[in-house]
Image (cartoon, rainbow, N blue to C red):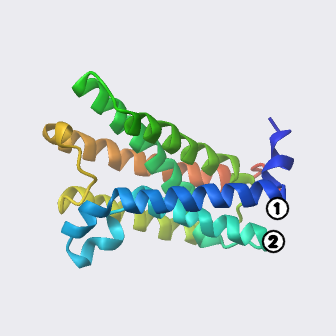
Amino acid sequence: MKWIYPLLANRPFLWLLLVVNIAGTVYGYVWYGWQLKETPPIFLLFVPDSPTASLFFVFVLAAFLMKKNWPLVEALAIVTLFKYGIWAVVMNLLVFTAQGELDWVGVMLIFSHFAMAVQALLYAPFYRFKWWHLVVTAIWTLHNDVIDYVFFMLPRYHMLHEVTPQIGYFTFWLSILSVGIGYYFVIRPNRFKLTI
């Protein structure tokens, strides 16, 4: 598996990944457009979950291209990319279960969000965040869950409306797991570490 890391640190590959993530981020904000129009201004920052996660990673990649580390953004990126990557895969599989079919957008969302979670983990050896960065990220992530499931600002899947409490419960524990992933791959002693 270690053969992949020289490719991940290669500047042309980092540029390619930056362009792909910028495009995905823009598409994500457009996808949320109708919901953002209906969102009270106080909640706007917390509604577009996946594109904000990929935006964090855009900043991580930009820092890498400058041969820098921005630890707080790295912590936000790994936790939110993993969380919302897995969350969107599960939600779209639930849509498929509820409807018996999934359109091409749903299939694309499954693959693109799975890729988000994978890239979060693949770049973990290059991250340099500390405990306090992860604590701030955990507060951000759990606060976002409150906004989504207490104030009902979550992405709207009308066919899953009846199971929103169960989705909220799943999302809370996915947040905890995602913070744990951040600790395991970046902070724990003797973790695998590389320089970009």
Earlier-in-chain disc, 1 versus 2: 2
Look at label 1 and name its amino acid.
Ile
x%, y% of residue 43?
26, 72
Q: Residue furthest front?
A: 104
Q: Are marks 1 and 2 in contact (CB under 8 Å)?
A: yes
The reply, left or right, for residue 91 in relation to residue 58 is left
Q: Which residue is mark 1?
A: 196
- In the displayed structure, 80 sits above or below 122; it is below
Q: Which residue is mark 2?
A: 67
What residue appears at the point 52 percent right and 48 percent down from the top-left corner?
82
- Density class for disc 1 (Cα within 10 Å; few <14, some 14-19, many ≥20) is many
Disc 2 residue crowd, few under 14, some 14–19, many 20+, Cα 10 Å: few
**Residue under the image location 28 percent in, 53 percent down:** 155
Residue 85 in sight here:
yes
Instruction: Give above or below for 105 relative to 22.
Output: above
Q: Secondary structure at mark 1?
A: loop
Residue drawn 19% across and 67% down?
Answer: 38
Q: Which image quarter: residue 109?
A: top left
Can you tell which quarter of the image residue 193 is in? bottom right
**Amino acid type shown at disc 2:** Lys
State the image coordinates of residue 124 (x, y, percent, origin top left). 69, 53
Check disc 2 and report its element: helix, strand or loop.
loop
Q: Residue furthest left?
A: 162
